[in-house]
Amino acid sequence: MKQTARRYLAMFLALVMCIGVLPVMQIAAANETVDYVTGSNGYIYNWGIRGEKATFLSQNAKAFYSGNNTYDVLSTYAGGTSTSNAPDSKLYDALYDLMESNHSYKTSYDATRDLYQYTDCENSGKDSKAISCFYTGKAIGPTWDAGATWNREHTWPNSKGLNGDDEDDIMMLRPTDSRTNSSRGNKAYGEGSAYYDPNGASSGNLDVRGDVARIFLYVYVRWGNTEGNSEYGTVWGTNGVIESLDVLLKWMEVDPVDTWELGRNDSVESITGTRNVFVDYPEFAFLLFGEDIPENMTTPSGGSGSSGSTTPSEGTTPTEGTTPDTPSTGTTTTVSVMISDYGTANNWAETTKYSTVELDENIVVTANGGGNTGKYYNDSEWRIYQSESGYLTVTAANGTTIKSVKITYNSEKSGVLTYNGVNVTSGTIAHVNASSAEFVVGNTGSATNGQARITAIEVVYETGDQSESTPGETEPTETTPGDTTEPTPAYTISFSVYDGLTAPAAQDSKVALPYAAAPDGYSFLGWVKDPIPTKTTDKPEIFEAGTVYPATEDIKLYAVYSFVEGGTSGYTKTDIADIKSTDVVVITMTKETTTWAMSNDKGTGGTPTAVVVSTNGDALTGNIEDNVLWNISNDNGSLTIYPNGTTATWLYCTSTNNGVRVGTNSSKVFTIDAASGYLKHNGTNRYLGVYTTNPDWRCYTNTTGNTANQTLGFYVLGTGTTYYITGSACSHTFTETVKENVVDATCTEAGSYDLVVYCTGCNEEMSRETIEIPAAHTYTNGECVCGRKDIRGVNRMKALILDGVITVKATVAFMDNNKATNAIGLS
């Protein structure tokens, strides 16, 4: 149900009473009316909701187009027939004139941070005054914190042709959280692994592809930026801003304008005077390049057809190499899972491997590969590694046919999933029509270390009366659920954990192994078949939580833990002179309150990205990704900096475009400049620092410009000896008791000792009791050091005749002389 409904006078009065201090103006419209909430400066708060389709034009949008600038007139002007001649067309000129002539106030870079409270809130700020992060929808701000948690994203990167007022245009400059901003760098938008997927930051929860396309068109026309920067001379492809015209128009269609975009257009117009015409009329995007407007595309104006129609789903055209769905009379079911939700529901632990994800009783997805494939990161990613021959298997239960699979993932190091040998980019529907499907992680480049970081999986399947599957259907493997050829018998697995902890309940062997808690100072690694009663440095064979144990009988598994002795954990700030070539190092630059780490991958155009990291004193905190880890070889102050684990490539600088690169250039030596404290590249005499606007790493001829006032830091991963142990595995049948911590008593002070019982089988301490030793004298030659006499061993026997009958013999000991004689009645 649409949340931006018509408002009438009674609702208007109620609104005024509710928000009090904020003035409200209502402008009547023939079809739709928006109640604009404004600040005292007249700026309109964004009234829209993200993801809510805009099926009407606001009254301010309608008012912007008048005279010869109505849609009916503008749409008659000829556009181009391609990207090469569209800028020379009459339509391009008319749209430029309309936006430029109304642009009365040009925002500055600093001003935008205080204007986002109007342009980038939701629902007129009634629910929250927070800003909505452009890529994720996460609530940020609105108070400016000098970039610590949020900053401003040049959706059209400065390095791709911006120069002047266009750099600071609030229409293009969007607020984002700092981590997301740094992850993009200046990478072009697009669908392949060589491009930046704008939906990746939200793990597919928020579609901003259309937003990106419409911002691109605004800058393309309003600022006449049709050729990018002088080096590449294009706005298309990897050296440009967006992959291609086809991708641009596709995104315009699959992600239609939402009310938040329309509300932002109203807000920006109230500040600058101009609007993005491609938000109000997405139809112009197609007309500008001589393309037909999609028949059922949803637009605010409804100018392209029925505005209430359903937006075409991405992937309705089969992926090359896949087979379209075949007709069927069975029951169709769509199941999907967000990895973040699945991990939370199943108590997945960070950096722990999990082999299976069950979408429902009919669909199971299995991660296959080496020791890292299937690991869970960032509370949202299930990772598959090309270097481990990693792949995903989607398997259906017996009698079920998989119709299609859509996998949403973040590509790392050019990683891409393939199905039947064809690349399947994130969010693309692969049509299967079989009982199983295998998605292999490959690489769009020549590298072999690509990753697919899975964030969501959607499967459409059928049960019941189905048409015949396509030839080439992959048969399930022996352990695949639903394979009834040779059913795997179920066994019972019980679990043993460290003393004082609660063991998981016994379970069926077909169920993935559970996670177990760890004692303080220990890390839970998984499960082992045999107990390790005494700590050892020999790493055992570990069956990780989330995997299925290959049971052949009922068995007890033991939780195995690791702990470190003789070292520190985490990354600690270290002087370069103390860093060894084997150390794992994070290289950082800090300015004010923000610290950026340097990535060890090539990034966009070979440039390492600047990744925001958190610090606490001299330590890094939070999750440190492997793409920021380095090794440093130090030869009397001459530093060679290698990506962690390799010497095949290294860090160097170029004199072109202030470039920092990871590659095989012959000039690879850096030194630390004594005067500035910056890393200096010997081959180019340039200084390494972070260009904070993007941000990314650059090499400049001095330290007073874009990288000024930064502090270099090296953080080294702590080392020590790692031990493994299972804890309470021994039955403790044989024990011995020993005294420890003995403190002798004195004449005046008590002593003590610990009485300890140890197991002789595993040397585990079973019990400990502290025994007190009373204060006592110590005698030598009949005298204590304190001067007291010793009468021990003096036997005095006296015969006392009592009543003339009884003879008494008294033995007196441990008494002083007077007490002894008095006791027997002698003087």
Image (spheres, rainbow, N blue to C red):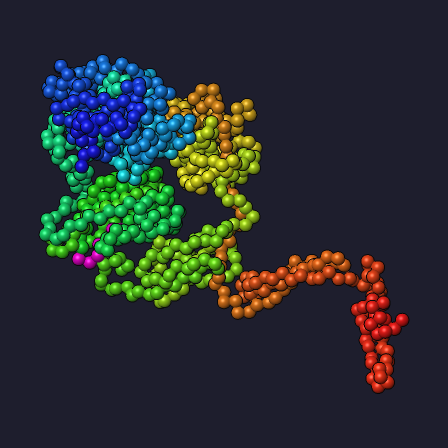
Is residue 703 rendered to the left or right of residue 383? right
Q: Quadrant of residue 80?
A: top left
Residue 547: tell me if it is visible: yes
Foreground residue, 105 or 357?
A: 105
Q: Which residue shows up at 49% across the image and 55% down it?
A: 724
Q: Is residue 396 magenta?
A: yes
Q: Which residue shows up at 40% across the image and 47% down it?
A: 351
Is residue 4 rendered to the left or right of residue 792? left
**Residue 138 percent across, percent down from the top left:** 33, 35
Q: Which residue shows up at 13% across the image and 33% down it?
A: 308
Q: Residue furthest right?
A: 827
Q: Is residue 610 magenta?
A: no
Q: Which residue shows up at 88% across the image and 73% down it?
A: 826
Foreground residue, 789 or 318?
A: 789
Is residue 592 rendered to the left or right of residue 805? left
Quarter of the image with the N terminus is top left
Q: Quadrant of residue 526?
A: bottom left
**Residue 618 percent across, percent down from the top left:** 52, 36
Quarter of the image with the C terminus is bottom right
**Residue 471 percent across, percent down from the top left:** 15, 52
Residue 212: tell me if it is visible: no
Is residue 362 rendered to the left or right of residue 731? left
The residues colored magenta run 393-399
